[in-house]
Amino acid sequence: MIRKNLEEVRENINKAILKSGREAEDVCLIAVSKTKPVELLLEAYEAGVRDFGENKVQELTDKYEKLPKDIRWHMIGHLQTNKVKYIVDKAYLIHSVDSVKLAKEISKEAVKKGLVCRILLEVNVADEDSKFGFSCEDVLTSIEEIAGLEGIRVAGLMTVAPYVEDPEENRPVFRKLKQLSVDITRKNIDNVSMDILSMGMSGDYQVAIEEGAKYVRVGTSIFGERNYSINKEK
Ligand SMILES: *Cc1c(COP(=O)(O)O)cnc(C)c1O
């Protein structure tokens, strides 16, 4: 089931790569495994997946302990400052840095552990009240302060686009994130690269690739619908 879903997603990714004239190495699939049991992650692992995305610290660290060590764990969910210490040395990339305060905490913990933590700045491109992230303007004003922090490397931008019926509706959102990355690159800030755009989910990853995504974060199309009811009852 998962193997078959993965085949389909990979095929769609390849189509989008061909359509946009990009290189296959430029795009990487992150299997978003939040709420899913390790058995299913192992199935995906056996089908070649090495990049997994989680949105909760506890879940990421539990799965980190149980699964093979060559997995790259991507933290994609809102991160509370008091939990940073548990994941700075486990996350391959933190996609969801949405405040200067959080960046400072990551810096502090990374320095303590003697490592450099790669981060993306999350941008709320569509300005939705329900979403975390910097506004486009705030990224531009905050990025130099963040880039100046020790133990951190800004590697790009991330966005969670609105939920839409037609993926084409999100094309302008992806385009805007790309444009923002171009504007930042032009500023030539030390310790900042804009190599990575993390954008596109099950409903719209092909459009995101056409607009320059490096990482697409796909959950439902690989693992099926998520069931949150068990947790909600607690
Ligand atoms: C859950 C989640 C995804 C995956 O969403 P699907 O629609 O299931 O593909 C991607 N990005 C983030 C930040 C998420 O929280």
Image (cartoon, helix red, strand yellow):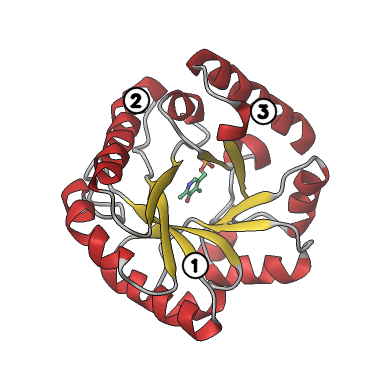
**Which residue is at a point 37% across and 60% down the rendered structure image?**
191
- Residue 94, label in figure: none
Q: Secondary structure at mark 3?
A: helix
Sequence-first tag of 2 and 1: 1
Location of mark 2 (residue)? 171
* Vertical position of residue 138 compared to residue 204: above or below: below
As measured in the structure, the alpha-carbon distance from the residue carrying label 3 to the one carrying label 2 is 20 Å
Say which element carries label 2: helix
Q: Which residue is mark 3?
A: 10
Q: Amino acid at mark 3?
A: Arg
Give the residue at mark 1.
117
N-term mark: 3 or 2: 3
Residue 231 visible in rendering: yes
Residue lying at the far bottom in this picture: please name it: 112
26 and 231: which one is in front? 26
Q: Quadrant of residue 6?
A: top right
What is the x, y in percent for residue 24?
62, 28
Q: Are marks 2 and 1 in contact (CB under 8 Å)?
A: no
Answer left or right for 57 relative to 146: right
Check disc 2 and give the amino acid type: Arg
Q: Position of residue 151 (x, y in %)?
A: 44, 73
Asked if disc 3 and disc 1 are in contact, CB closer than 8 Å, the reply is: no
Q: Nearer the viewer, mark 2 or mark 1?
A: 1
- Can the viewer see residue 234 in this picture? no
Q: Identify the secondary structure beneath mark 1.
A: strand
Q: CA distance from mark 2 to mark 1?
A: 30 Å
Q: Amino acid at mark 1?
A: Cys
Category of crowding for the residue at label 2, using alpha-carbon neighbours closer than 10 angstroms: few (below 14), some (14–19), many (at least 20): some
